[in-house]
Image: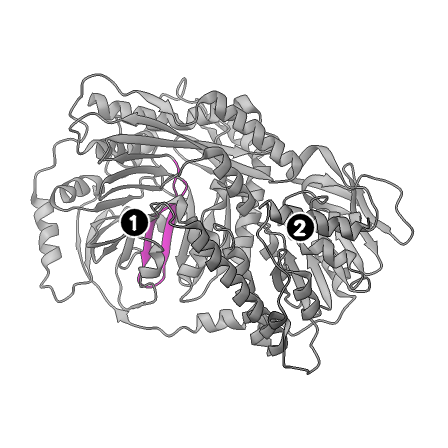
């Protein structure tokens, strides 16, 4: 039996067994085209569902049309590509389920003289087709930059579980570079392969490799042509305009104000910038308010109006709109979250690109194939029957709110109801004149809380070992495995979650803290991490990977900070997610940049390793951007789609709001969402509470250390719950409304010994 026959047979068996979605050969109608004019050149990028693929097109001088690796070979042949890029991806080069159409392209004999560049998995596919051995590495290396020797020598970023070992190569195959892992780069005729990732922010020789690839063929169109659709989005009409009225007061205790407001209204919130955030000066605002209408069903973002234009001048970035949260499960409406939606989304973008170039013949082929694919998806949905309803989150419409400027120490009441005769301003004045609410946490309850992990320690450790095995096999590079610490709230405690938050904001002050009292849930969050921000058409994300505790003395503190800065494991975790965020951004943004990499930010209790990614988004794309990037990669791992499938198999239950995003979405398309970590959730209907905790697992992870990380991450939540139960409270308070900035400075070196370990490898 020939190699091709074996490949086809294996693919068919895998499809029958349900390991990959069924993809019947494209029908004649899908391949039919009535345009007989000569085809322009076409570069095709085959995407293996990797989380770094979208960073490749910006490196090419002429942009490719991207197709999923699940398309039939007939579609590829009908499109007649003049050059092909095989993307990175998870999996095993020997498994046709993972290589898909890429192996079929190479073995078909139709593309022997076509310029082809294979990256990572693509490189391994080319090597295997050329007869080279590809073997599993004894120790996988992901997110590690190394120096490679040879013509393509220099600094490379490795995401290696498999690699062709150093070996004698067939005639006509040229080894371009090698490392201790094996053959890192080859060329055979017009086929090039590189094991490292040229698109990574840490690879120095990427442009050289891309240049050699592009020298072999004529480009098609221009980068400007490919971004035509994005430019059209940027020219979205201003739409409905709106304005606001504002009245300022000399008052700076946002939490005291919130407690009073919470006594008057339902569905209240506080977005509590509870630190002196010198790293993001614009995050000096806290917001307090209540929702007038809630959106909590289905695809929530579809129901929100995010394309208005604000006219006027008010304090803060939020200018009215929606405040709330997306649960982790909202991923089912996002690009990486469901079974076929990534392929459908990629195909729609390919059609848009071809139509922008006036390439109607190829456009018609993909449109016909897309119709068949969408028909398959509808059939699958009917076969699946009714799905169990999952909570997707909740956003509330906000037209009246209060903003606290912590730099100027003032409160400003803002309203969009400018013709309501100042009713909101009057209410704010009444609240300010009221006596303070009785201290939250002053009530004590009998007994004490009992905590239990949803996944017990022995199973969690076993899951860590399973993930390390999956990493070794190349199924993933990094996974964020999570757990939940569960407890029962005391009976008759309607404000228990607020009491927890009152303590949590003092125990763990954080720039993206918040409390929600929406419907039957109380959410107490003290997150230090920004998921996304959109302001003036620019998108930003600041993923955190790598944390260490502050030292007990200035000398010890400096040692800890330097230890984090030089940590190979933390830097590997950080760059993997920074590269992932770059790729997510590149799906919808232009001019994507890494403004900071491995930056160390110091807060009251920890030092953190932070990277910052920005991109130009333009107007009218907030929903599209969120769906291209959610859930945040630092809470999934990489590659995102394959990692989420592994997570589902291990965790087996919904994460809920933990790992999702909390914040606001403006009528004007601006947005700010945190990463939901360091969070306690109370279900008022059941009286049950949960503390989320977890950590990133890589090939370098130690099982016992990772479990210790989970335990440590839960400590602050446990302490806040215990204090709320006993009626005690943490002394000192947060940066604002709890002692002020000077109190923060005084607390910085107090009570360090015994509170934090010298080294906490936590996120």
* Image position, residue 327 (x, y; %): 37, 45
Picture residue at 53% right of the left edge, 28% below the top: 463
Q: Is residue 361 magenta?
A: no
Q: Is residue 655 left or right of residue 174?
A: left
Residue 155 occupies quadrant: top right
Which mark sits nearer the N-terminus, 2 or 1?
2
Pick the residue in front: 115 or 240: 115
| Residue 520 or residue 313, whichever sits in front | 520
Vertical position of residue 532 compared to residue 142: above or below: below
Q: Position of residue 78 (x, y in %)?
A: 68, 70
Q: Is residue 153 left or right of residue 356?
A: right
Can residue 317 be seen in the rendering of this structure?
A: no
- Could you say where residue 502 lies in the image, as x and y percent from the top left? 24, 33
Q: Is residue 92 left or right of residue 538?
A: right
| Residue 96: percent from left, percent from top | 69, 48
Name the residue beneath numbered marker 1.
Answer: 394
- Quadrant in which residue 474 is drawn: top right
Quadrant of the image occupied by residue 219: bottom right
> Which mark identifies residue 26?
none
Residue 150 vs residue 595, the one in the foreground: 150
In the picture of the structure, the residue carrying the numbered disc 2 is 12
* Residue at the outermost right position: 171
Q: Residues within 10 Å of mark 2 (few under 14, many from 20)?
A: some
Secondary structure, mark 1, is strand
The span from disc 2 to disc 1 (Cα, nearest Å) is 43 Å
Q: How did the renderer colour the structure?
A: one colour
Nearer the observer, disc 2 or disc 1?
Answer: 2
Q: Which residues are magenta?
A: 659-677
Is residue 676 highlighted in magenta? yes
Q: Secondary structure at mark 2?
A: helix
């Amino acid at each position: 039996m020939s190699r091709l026959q074996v490949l086809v047979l294996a693919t068919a068996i895998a499809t029958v067994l349900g390991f990959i979605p069924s993809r019947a050969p494209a029908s004649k109608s899908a391949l039919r085209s009535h345009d007989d004019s000569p085809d322009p050149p076409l570069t095709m990028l085959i995407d293996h569902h990797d989380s770094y693929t979208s960073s490749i097109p910006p490196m090419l001088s002429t942009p490719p049309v991207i197709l999923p690796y699940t398309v039939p070979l007939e579609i590829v042949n009908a499109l007649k590509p003049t050059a092909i890029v095989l993307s990175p991806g998870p999996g095993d080069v020997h498994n046709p389920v993972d290589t898909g159409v890429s192996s079929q392209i190479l073995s078909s004999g139709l593309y022997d003289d076509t310029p082809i560049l294979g990256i990572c998995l693509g490189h391994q596919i080319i090597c295997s087709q050329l007869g080279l051995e590809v073997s599993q590495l004894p120790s996988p290396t992901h997110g590690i930059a190394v120096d490679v020797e040879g013509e393509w020598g220099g600094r490379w970023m490795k995401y290696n579980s498999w690699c062709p070992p150093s070996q004698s190569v067939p005639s006509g195959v040229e080894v371009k570079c090698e490392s201790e892992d094996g053959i890192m780069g080859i060329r055979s005729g017009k086929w090039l392969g590189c094991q490292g990732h040229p698109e990574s922010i840490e690879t120095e020789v990427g442009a050289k490799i891309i240049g050699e690839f592009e020298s072999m063929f004529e480009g098609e169109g221009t980068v400007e042509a490919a971004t035509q659709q994005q430019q059209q989005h940027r020219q979205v009409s201003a739409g409905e305009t709106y304005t606001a009225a504002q009245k300022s007061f000399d008052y700076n205790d946002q939490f005291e104000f919130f407690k009073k407001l919470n006594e008057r209204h339902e569905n209240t919130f506080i977005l509590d910038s509870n630190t002196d955030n010198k790293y993001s000066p614009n995050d000096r605002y806290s917001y307090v308010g209540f929702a007038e209408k809630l959106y909590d069903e289905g695809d929530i973002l579809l129901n929100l109006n995010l394309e208005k234009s604000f006219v006027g001048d008010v304090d803060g970035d939020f200018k009215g709109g929606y405040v709330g949260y997306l649960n982790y499960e909202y991923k089912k409406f996002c690009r990486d979250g469901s079974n076929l939606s990534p392929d459908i989304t990629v195909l729609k973008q390919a059609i848009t690109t071809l139509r922008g170039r006036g390439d109607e013949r190829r456009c018609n082929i993909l449109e016909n194939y897309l119709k068949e694919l969408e028909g398959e998806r509808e059939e699958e949905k009917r076969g699946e029957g009714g799905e169990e309803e999952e909570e997707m989150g909740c956003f509330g419409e906000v037209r009246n709110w209060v903003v606290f400027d912590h730099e100027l120490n003032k409160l400003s009441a803002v309203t969009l109801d400018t013709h309501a005769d100042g009713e909101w301003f009057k209410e704010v004045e009444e609240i300010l004149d009221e006596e303070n609410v009785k201290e939250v946490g002053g009530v004590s309850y009998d007994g004490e809380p009992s905590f239990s992990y949803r996944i017990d320690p022995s199973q969690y450790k076993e899951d860590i070992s399973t993930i390390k095995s999956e990493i070794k096999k190349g199924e993933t590079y990094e996974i964020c495995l999570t757990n939940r610490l569960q407890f029962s709230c005391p009976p008759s405690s309607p404000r228990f979650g607020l009491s927890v938050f009152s303590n949590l904001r003092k125990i763990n002050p954080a720039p993206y803290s918040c409390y929600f009292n929406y419907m039957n849930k109380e959410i107490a969050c003290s997150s230090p991490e920004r998921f996304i921000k959109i302001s003036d058409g620019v998108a930003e994300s600041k993923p955190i990977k790598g944390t260490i505790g502050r030292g007990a003395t200035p000398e010890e503190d400096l040692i800890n900070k330097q230890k984090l800065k030089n940590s190979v494991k933390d830097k590997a975790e950080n760059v993997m997610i920074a590269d992932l965020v770059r790729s997510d951004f590149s799906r919808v943004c232009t001019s994507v940049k890494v403004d900071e990499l491995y930056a160390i930010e110091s807060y009251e209790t920890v030092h953190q390793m932070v990277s910052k990614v920005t991109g130009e988004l333009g107007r009218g794309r907030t929903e599209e951007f969120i769906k291209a990037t959610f859930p945040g990669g630092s809470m999934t791992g990489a590659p995102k789609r394959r990692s989420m499938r592994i997570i589902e198999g291990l965790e087996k239950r919904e994460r809920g709001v933990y790992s999702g995003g909390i914040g606001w979405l403006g009528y004007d398309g601006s947005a700010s969402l945190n990463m939901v970590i360091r969070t306690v959730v109370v279900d008022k209907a059941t009286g049950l509470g949960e503390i989320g905790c977890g950590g990133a697992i890589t090939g370098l992870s130690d099982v016992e250390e990772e479990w210790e990380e989970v335990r440590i991450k839960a400590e602050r939540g446990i302490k806040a719950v215990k204090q709320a139960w006993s009626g005690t409270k943490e002394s000192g308070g947060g940066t604002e409304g709890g002692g002020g900035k000077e109190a923060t400075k005084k607390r910085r070196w107090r009570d360090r010994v015994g509170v934090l370990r010298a080294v906490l490898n936590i996120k």
